[in-house]
Amino acid sequence: MTPHAREVESLSIDASDALIAAFPPLGGGRAEAIVRRIDEAVMLGLLHDGDQLPSELDLADQFGVANGTIREALRLLREQGVVDTRRGRGGGSFVRTNDAAMHSLHFDRLSGMNATELRDLGDEQTAIFAAVARLAAERAAPTATDRLRRLVAALRVAATPAQRRRAEARFHIELAVESQSVRLTHSEVRLQAELGPMIWLPGHSPDHKEVADRLEAITVSVGAGDSTHARVEAENHALSCIRTVLTTHMAIADT
């Protein structure tokens, strides 16, 4: 089996293990890059408040870096207030999240962007997600639609914008995993961390049941092996998401 094939195989996982997709080897070893990856995992809901991070040795192995780089990354994360490190029995590094603070952060970030930047981000998301859906329809395992339907169901019953953001992001990542493309999966993780939180800002987020309907349509196409319709449905979903963000951006500008 080639190294690429082994990495694709490692991504063919249940959604609960999606951290594998979020924590690929870095190849460079900078602590700041590890901080960014862990921040992304928190934003995507792959890591929740109180979750314990893997040990320093396991993180070093997963990222392909030295233990000292991991220790520096954890120090930076503690300074940001993203993790707490506890010593002694039952110790380790634990995630700290605050949904209100995260929403405020992304509201400010959206306010500082212009329409051209947002459209460019939307173009990238549309292209990546369309390719992901097309390939998933061609390559997905027979059990894939069951996992995707569970994620759609989770979105339908999600009660808060933060829960809805996490449910949609998990769908995107699971679909990317089913595309069996390592590069597309890594791109989807990055885009969901960058764009996803701005879609689900409180007071400006879309009707989550309509979003769930669109994801259900993608799931049906993937299950049927219909790559053309899967691509079209994915494009429609991505375009609708960026329209939501642009509408929110205009509303912020008018206040």
Image: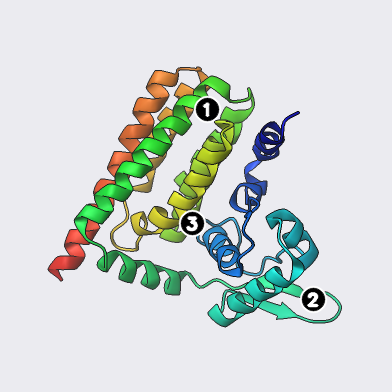
124 left or right, relative to 97: left
Do the numbered discs 3 and 2 sit on residues whose CB atoms are within 8 Å?
no
Residue 142 in sight in this render: yes
Tag 1: amino acid: Ala
Q: Residue at x 59, y 55 (%)?
A: 46
Q: In the image shown, does 28 or 19 lie closer to the viewer? A: 28
Q: Residues within 10 Å of mark 1 (few under 14, many from 20)?
A: many
Q: Which residue is mark 3?
A: 163
Q: On the image, which quarter does residue 238 sit in?
A: top left
Q: Residue at x 36, y 36 (%)?
A: 127
Q: Which residue is mark 1?
A: 136
Tag 2: amino acid: Gly
Q: Residue at x 34, y 26 (%)?
A: 232
* N-terminal label among 2 and 1: 2
Residue 63 pos. (x, y %): 68, 56
126 shown above or below 17: above
186 left or right, relative to 218: right
Spatial separation of the CA atoms under disc 2 and disc 1: 40 Å
Q: Which residue is mark 2?
A: 91
What's the mark number on residue 156?
Answer: none
76 shown above or below 45: below
Q: Quadrant of the C terminus?
A: bottom left
254 left or right, relative to 151: left
Badge nearest the viewer, 1 or 3: 1
Badge nearest the viewer, 3 or 2: 2
Instruction: Identify the secondary structure beneath mark 3.
Output: helix
Q: In the image shown, does 101 or 54 lie closer to the viewer? A: 54
Instruction: Identify the secondary structure beneath mark 1.
Output: helix
Residue 31 pos. (x, y %): 61, 69
Q: In the image shown, does 168 or 160 lie closer to the viewer? A: 168
* N-terminal label among 3 and 2: 2
Tag 3: amino acid: Gln
